[in-house]
Image (cartoon, rainbow, N blue to C red):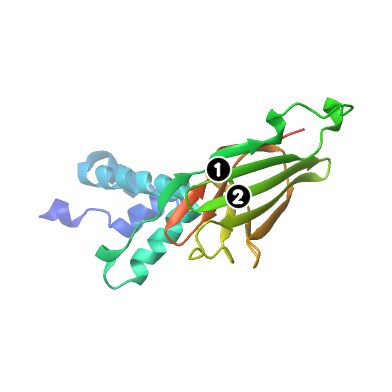
Amino acid sequence: MGQKENHIELPALRDFACSVVSMDAKSKNHIEICGQCQSNLKWLQWLADFGVRERSYEPPAWVTANAGKVFRLKKPGFVTVAKEIIANLVYDSFNEPLPAGVRQQARPPRQTLYSTDKLQLDLKIDVSDEGGLIIGQIIAYDIAVNTTGLRIELTESGHLIGKSSTNALGEFILQGLPKGHYELQVVLPDTLVKLPPLSLDS
């Protein structure tokens, strides 16, 4: 009973683990001979390290949106989680031969067209010394699909690089983008439409 009462309290161990206060000699001596306090201190140190790593992780925006829907509803069992769809590439001007007289260095902006069963996505991609530019328009095959105010996200390895939203004509723009390899996605109420990886380079 006496040994149990002499354990170092968890708040004090937490301060030691997070380096809030320095460990005094008495506490060091106790931890060296007390297996329970050693275990508690190791667990708190692991928890502190995990917290630092967790803060550096940025979940994809669609995951956060789905989680928000779940917790806002009184009956989470009825939540429909958004499904992911990869759009098909229909046309890419970079796959076509250059027009006569156009040099490789003076290549015009890239035009691409993607399609799903509900949407068509037309992109113009241009790269200059000032940064990358993506201009797009979303057209719905089904009049029931509203293309106004859709969220457009550009990510790189899961990190959000840029975002935009569509206007009344389904148009959007992303500009000032650094060169790199990105993923573009369109967030619908019940579907996440993702495009194959995009490369913004010279």
Callout 2–callout 1 Cβ contact below 8 Å: yes
Badge 2 local density, few (<14 within 10 Å), some, or many (20+)?
many
Per the image, label 2 sits on a secondary structure element best described as strand
Earlier in the chain: of badge 2 and badge 1, it is 2
- Asked whether 144 or 47 is in front, the reply is 144
Compared with 136, 77 (above or below) is below
Residue plotted at (59% across, 38% down): 90
Q: Classify residue 110 by image quadrant.
A: top right
Q: Quadrant of the N terminus?
A: bottom left
Amino acid marked by disc 1: Leu
Per the image, label 1 sits on a secondary structure element best described as loop
- Place of residue 72 in the rendered image (x, y in percent of width and height, measured from the top left): 36, 71
- Place of residue 41 in the rendered image (x, y in percent of width and height, measured from the top left): 31, 46
Rounded to the nearest angstrom, the CA distance separating label 2 from label 1 is 9 Å
Residue behind mark 1: 195
Residue plotted at (83% across, 45% down): 130
- Place of residue 108 in the rendered image (x, y in percent of width and height, measured from the top left): 81, 37
Q: Tag on residue 52?
A: none
| Residue 56 seen from this side | no
Q: Classify residue 100 by image quadrant.
A: top right
| Residue 82 seen from this side | yes
Left or right side of 190 for 186: right
